[in-house]
Amino acid sequence: MLKNRTKSILVATDFSNCAKNAADYVLSLSGLFDVTIDLVHVVTVPIVDPMVPSFYLETAFREQSDADWSLLAKEKKRLEKKAKDMGIDVQIDALLKTGISNLQIAKAAEEVQAEFIVVGSKGKDWVRSILGSTTEDLLHTLNRALLVIPTDAKFTPLKKMIFASDIKEGDALALKKFSEHTALFKAEAEVLHINEKGIPEVEEAFHELQQKVNIDELKFSTIPMREPSAVLTFLANLEEASIIAFRKIHRPFFKAIFHRSLIKEKIYYSEKPILVYP
């Protein structure tokens, strides 16, 4: 049934203003290429006292599911009206799932063969940055490119996208996908590595990565500076990059503290959309 579908963008929503802003961003993005927007909401199983009768739990859960389906249908209708007002011809489907949010979102992405999973970021919340969020949980089950839209981000024509490379195994494959996406969005593409210690061997490894990828449309640059997060933000603003991309590092926790914390920091504090590759 999915063979004849266009590319899909799976947009996760909890009906918050942040999620609606992410959906609006995707709606504008959908005007660049043929795509289906799959709007998904996950009804989480409530935690109740084990002494509560099962029939009460079933009733409460059914009522919650019905209420959430009504909200999902309302959000779908809002997006369809906005698409019509903007002159964008796009198919919008609604999916209601039940269970643990990040697992069900990842499962839905597989079902619709999504090119991207899109979520909204609520931004600078110290409690959320410590305790985590659905967005952060998705990083652990990431099976598609994850596009995180800050709560105040508004869509503008995608002029440039920057991929921050840590020169790790797997970057070449992610960069080929990154190149496809920049072409899809009609954006200039740059691959950037911030060589904190200015080590020559790192420069050589970055050059080898460039040769391995061998895509003319990708511009490769290295900068010998410390404070990679601040430098990346400065350059993204200076070069008017629309999206900053990373690749999730598949390493044991203690060996991936630096890069994972950088991604986490950008997810919570970046004013620009963040794209994370699995």
Image (spheres, grey):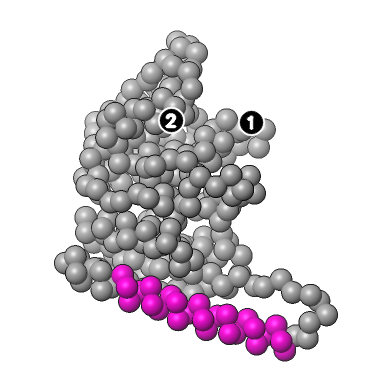
21 within the magenta span: no
* Residue 204 location, quadrant: top left
Vertical side of 206 occupied by 76: above or below: below
Residue at the spot of label 1: 255
66 within the magenta span: yes
Label 2 SS: loop
Residue 184: x percent and y percent?
25, 49
The N terminus lies in which quarter of the figure?
bottom left
Q: Is 254 left or right of 22, judged from the image as shown?
A: right
* Mark number, residue 34: none
- The residue closer to the viewer here, 258 or 129, is 129
Identified by mark 2, the residue type is: Ser
Which residue is at 27% across, 30% downward? 239
Which residue is at 45% across, 81% downward? 70
Magenta segment boundaries in residue numbering = 55-79
Which residue is at 65% across, 37% downward? 252
> Contact, CB < 8 Å: mark 2 with mark 1?
no
Crowding at mark 2 (Cα within 10 Å: few <14, some 14-19, many 20+)? many
Which residue is at 48% across, 52% downward? 122
Vertical side of 172 occupied by 16: above or below: below
Residue 32: x percent and y percent?
21, 55
Residue at the spot of label 2: 165
